[in-house]
Image (cartoon, rainbow, N blue to C red):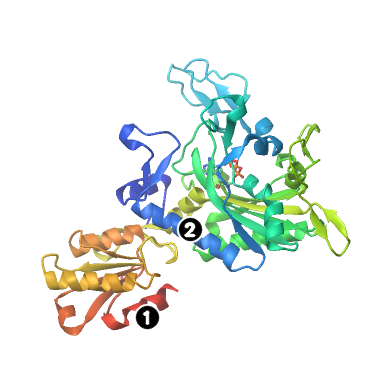
């Protein structure tokens, strides 16, 4: 039995149509990946599972989908324009550029010997573009580097249109763009990615309690969808590493690099921060953006005050905010890695299987006609597929791509929980063979009873 490594996952993802290098046909575009037929289903299921837990199953949440292109002022007053940068170093010999905290001084330089690095200097990670037909500084806009700012600048809109009372939260899933100096490790660090973020607004004074509750909720979500306890860790950021606006941050770390030594196996999959009233103080009429060095810029552009009227005290106040912020691509990668297993079966046969939670599996059911050249059998298989698909809940695929062994191998590798085989006997007794992904157990089930049988087991 062997588990996942990044290399094994990359190979499986390409082979089975989860992910392809972005713009591959033209040599690729670094830091971009395209989700293939299986990848788009898996990623959509991850997003759906998150939205369901964090919006539908709670009574204190609203959803939002803000624009990716943002007025420059949003990113000025959020502090990103001045400070959203990573330290960059150049090698004087080979001219390559590295993120200073990722640069390995022992790495060999292509020009011979070790690299000869310059002093680090800040490199802003935001992508700029021009809005409208005139290219000028006045028409410059940013692609958002995080979804969070779209939530903060809509706080008052959501509050006024929903009549919410504190505490309540706003959830958003969407693309974010960062011009990472060195994108690497597959979809772990890319330049175009998606985030799933919540800004949860609370009364000042209740923030520590809500922070703890959100950490527990988010950990439970990962475990519910199958992440093994030993592969997920919590890291409470030490005070000296906290961003200046954060009162406390706990990172959830996943074992993305099992081949590394000790703690280096774990890297951030999600961060949960207590951002206090920082963001709403930035984005409000008459507010100000504070920086680490104690300086600040007054907000001279916001057109209204983003405050909350507290009926109990008859006062306007600025809520505190708890932010659980995860990356869809990193979370999807964590689910892929956690589900992956290479098994050696009795008799020495090998198989690779993804034990994905059924809600996440790209395909729930594969219908396989035993003989591709028997029209009756293929027709029956198609009919079963149509009927199951019509439920709207069971993504079903007709798999007549090869012999039965190949079909099973393919479905195991994409994590399909059930395969249904239509054979000669099925035409007579109206039953099919149901094969279970994890146990490989097989049983005969009446076609009429399939929908109920599958729904019960997939729930
Ligand atoms: P890192 O330190 O790894 O660069 P970060 O602390 O800057 O990450 P945040 O700004 O807290 O990340 O973003 C929240 C989440 O968004 C991260 O936990 C991660 O899952 C995801 N994320 C951030 N940057 C990237 C990226 N370049 N590629 C893929 N996912 C990302």
> In the picture, residue 207 is in which quadrant?
bottom right
Q: Is residue 246 above or below residue 71?
A: below
Residue pointed to by mark 1: 452
- Picture quadrant of residue 387: bottom left
Residue 340 coordinates in the image, percent (x, y): 40, 56
> Residue placed at 53% from the left, 55% from the top?
231
> Measuring 37% from the left and 80% from the top, which residue is drawn there?
452
Compared to 229, does 328 lie above or below? above
- Which residue is label 2 attached to? 46
Distance from mark 2 CB to nearest ligand 1 atom below 8 Å: no
- Give the secondary structure at mark 2: helix
Q: Residue at x 49, y 15 (%)?
A: 93
User: Decide: marks 1, 2 in contact (CB < 8 A)?
Assistant: no
Task: Give the quadrant of the N terminus.
Answer: bottom left
Place of residue 272 in the rendered image (x, y in percent of width and height, measured from the top left): 65, 52
Residue drawn at x 41%, y 42% as measured from the top left: 33
């Amino acid at each position: 039995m062997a588990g996942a490594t990044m290399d094994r996952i990359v190979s499986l993802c390409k082979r089975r149509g989860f992910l392809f290098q972005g713009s591959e046909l033209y040599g690729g575009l670094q830091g971009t990946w395209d989700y293939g037929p299986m990848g788009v289903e898996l990623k959509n299921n991850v997003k759906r599972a998150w939205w369901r837990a964090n919006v539908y199953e709670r009574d204190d949440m609203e959803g939002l989908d803000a624009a990716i292109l943002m007025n420059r002022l949003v990113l000025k007053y959020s502090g990103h324009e001045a400070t959203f940068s990573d330290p960059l170093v150049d090698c004087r010999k080979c001219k390559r550029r590295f993120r200073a905290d990722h640069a390995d001084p022992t790495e060999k330089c292509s020009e011979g010997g070790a690299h000869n690095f310059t002093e680090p200097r800040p490199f802003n990670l935001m992508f700029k573009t021009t809005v409208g037909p005139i290219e000028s500084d006045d028409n410059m806009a940013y692609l958002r580097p995080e979804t969070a700012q779209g939530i903060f600048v809509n706080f008052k809109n959501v509050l006024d249109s929903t009549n919410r009372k504190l505490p309540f939260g706003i959830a958003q899933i969407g693309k974010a763009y960062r011009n990472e100096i060195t994108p690497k490790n597959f979809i772990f660090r890319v330049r175009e990615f998606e985030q799933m973020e919540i800004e949860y607004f609370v009364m000042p004074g209740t923030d520590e309690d809500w922070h703890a509750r959100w950490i527990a909720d988010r950990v439970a979500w990962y475990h519910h969808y199958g992440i093994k306890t030993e592969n997920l860790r919590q890291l409470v950021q030490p005070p000296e590493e906290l961003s200046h606006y954060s009162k406390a941050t706990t990172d959830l770390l996943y074992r993305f690099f099992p081949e590394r030594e000790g703690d280096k196996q774990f890297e951030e999959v999600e961060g949960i921060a207590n951002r206090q009233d920082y963001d709403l103080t930035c984005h409000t009429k008459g507010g100000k953006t504070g920086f680490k060095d104690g300086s600040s810029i007054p907000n001279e552009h916001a057109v209204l005050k983003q405050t909350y009227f507290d009926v109990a005290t008859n006062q306007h106040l600025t809520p505190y905010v708890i932010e659980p912020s995860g990356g869809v691509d990193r979370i999807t990668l964590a689910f892929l890695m956690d589900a992956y297993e290479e098994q050696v079966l009795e008799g020495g046969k090998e198989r690779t299987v993804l034990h994905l939670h059924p809600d996440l599996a790209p395909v729930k059911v594969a219908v396989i006609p035993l003989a591709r050249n028997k029209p009756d059998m293929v027709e029956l298989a198609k009919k079963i597929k149509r009927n199951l698909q019509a439920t709207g809940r069971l993504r079903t695929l007709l798999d007549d791509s090869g012999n039965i062994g190949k079909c099973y191998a393919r479905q195991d590798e994409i994590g399909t929980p059930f395969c249904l085989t239509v054979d000669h006997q099925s035409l007579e007794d109206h039953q099919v063979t149901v094969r279970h992904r994890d146990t490989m157990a097989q049983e005969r089930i009446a076609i009429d009873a399939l929908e109920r049988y599958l729904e019960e087991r997939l729930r």
